[in-house]
């Protein structure tokens, strides 16, 4: 292959790698038949963040996650919390598109007794 063909091949391979990562994330995120179980809030937040990561970079939006160590585990379906967070993050990104100045979305968490409170701000 000449240099130009190698360059195109590398771009295709990088693109396929990204497609593979996205497909794995979608499969991990898609609902499965599950029984309620304990899960870490941080894992749900990270999964939702991973699904909007490309858009965050593309739109120049910074996402700050502040979850203190030791938050209680939740008992339920982690995918439901991920879906809620994903929807909120997409709404925030839609609102911030085209706005001047620094664009920031923050997710903060805190323990309230045995429950967890999450606050999302854009």
Image (cartoon, rainbow, N blue to C red):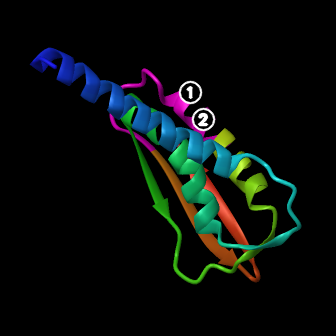
Residue at the spot 19% in from the left edge and 23% down from the top edge: 7
In the foreground, 122 or 75: 75
Q: Residue furthest front?
A: 1
Q: Which numbered marker is on residue 94?
A: 1
User: Taking 12 as reference, is 102 above or below it?
Assistant: below
- In x, y percent, where is residue 112? 71, 77
Residue at the spot 70% in from the left edge and 77% down from the top edge: 73
Secondary structure under the numbered disc 2 in the rendered image: helix
In the foreground, 105 or 77: 77
Q: Residue furthest left?
A: 3
- Magenta highlight on residue 95: yes
Secondary structure under the numbered disc 1 in the rendered image: helix
Residue at the spot 41% in from the left edge and 38% down from the top edge: 17
Image quadrant in which you'd find residue 92: top right
- In x, y percent, where is residue 61? 40, 38
Q: Quadrant of the N terminus?
A: top left
Image quadrant in which you'd find residue 26: top right
Separation of residues labelled 1 and 2 (CA atoms): 6 Å
Start and end of the magenta stretch? 88-104
Residue pointed to by mark 2: 90
Residue at the spot 55% in from the left edge and 62% down from the top edge: 108
Whether tag 1 and tag 2 are in contact, CB under 8 A, the answer is yes
User: Taking 36 as reference, is 17 above or below it?
Assistant: above
Q: Is residue 119 left or right of residue 30?
A: left
Q: Which numbered marker is on residue 71?
A: none
- In x, y percent, where is residue 74? 75, 73
The crowding category of the residue bearing disc 2, from other C-alpha atoms within 10 Å (few below 14, some 14 to 19, many at least 20), is some
- In x, y percent, where is residue 105? 48, 46
The crowding category of the residue bearing disc 1, from other C-alpha atoms within 10 Å (few below 14, some 14 to 19, many at least 20), is few
User: Taking 7 as reference, is 108 above or below it?
Assistant: below
């Amino acid at each position: 292959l000449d240099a130009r063909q190698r360059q195109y091949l590398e771009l295709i391979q990088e693109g396929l790698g990204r497609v593979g990562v996205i497909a794995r994330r979608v499969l991990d995120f898609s609902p499965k038949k599950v029984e309620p179980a304990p899960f870490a809030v941080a894992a749900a937040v990270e999964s939702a963040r991973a699904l909007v990561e490309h858009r965050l970079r593309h739109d120049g939006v910074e996402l700050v996650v502040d979850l203190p160590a030791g938050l209680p585990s939740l008992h339920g379906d982690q995918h439901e919390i991920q879906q809620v967070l994903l929807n909120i993050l997409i709404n925030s990104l839609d609102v911030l598109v085209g706005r001047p100045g620094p664009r920031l979305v923050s997710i903060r968490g805190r323990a309230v007794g045995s429950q967890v409170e999450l606050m999302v701000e854009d």
